């Protein structure tokens, strides 16, 4: 979507946290794996960029990657996986 399309940007900005909260039970249980696979998918070699300032385009993935709600919901499993990797 383009930066100039304000309605789409506001809709994406408001609906991404709602979708993340809908998936919160899964993220609280398996958040670290889901988030890592998603980030690998978004930043893979053949993927289009999530933010193109020169062309004035922004991807919906940008809202997901920069979401503090997603980071907050994935924090417990990330902390647990770090604890297990240090103890093991």
Image: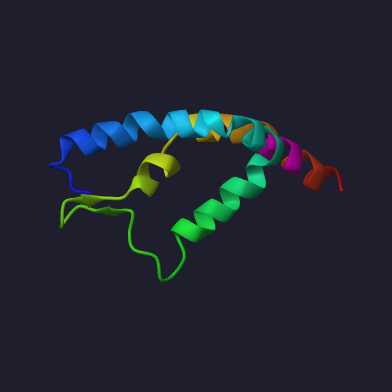
Query: Is-magenta flag for residue 80?
Result: yes
Q: Main secondary structure of the magenta part?
A: helix
Viewed as shown, does residue 64 lie left or right of 21? left
Residue at the limit of the structure toward the right, as seen here: 88
Q: Give residue 46's quadrant in the image.
A: bottom left
Asked if one can make out residue 68 in the rendered structure from this viewpoint, the answer is no
Of residue 5 and residue 46, the one placed in the foreground of this image is 5
Asked if one can make out residue 49 in the rendered structure from this viewpoint, the answer is yes
Q: Give residue 79's quadrant in the image.
A: top right
Q: Is residue 39 above or below residue 17?
A: below
Residue shown at 63% from the left, 36% from the top: 27
The x, y position of residue 49, in whole percent, is 33, 59
Residue shown at 24% from the left, 37% from the top: 9
Q: Is residue 73 above or below residue 85?
A: above
The x, y position of residue 25, in whole percent, is 65, 31
Residue shown at 19% from the left, 52% from the top: 53
Viewed as shown, does residue 77 lie left or right of 5? right
Residue at the limit of the structure toward the left, as seen here: 4
Viewed as shown, does residue 84 lie left or right of 18? right
Report the span colored magenta: 77-81
The x, y position of residue 20, in whole percent, is 50, 33
Viewed as shown, does residue 69 lie left or right of 27? left
Residue shown at 44% from the left, 70% from the top: 45
Query: Is-magenta flag for residue 32?
Result: no
The x, y position of residue 48, in whole percent, is 34, 63
């Amino acid at each position: 979507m383009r930066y100039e399309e304000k309605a789409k940007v506001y809709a994406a900005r408001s609906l991404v946290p709602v979708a993340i909260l809908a998936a919160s039970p899964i993220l609280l249980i398996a958040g670290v794996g889901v988030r890592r696979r998603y980030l690998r998918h978004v930043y893979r070699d053949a993927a289009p960029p999530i933010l193109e300032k020169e062309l004035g385009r922004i991807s919906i993935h940008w809202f997901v990657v920069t979401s503090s709600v997603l980071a907050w919901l994935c924090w417990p499993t990330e902390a647990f996986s770090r604890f297990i990797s240090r103890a093991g």
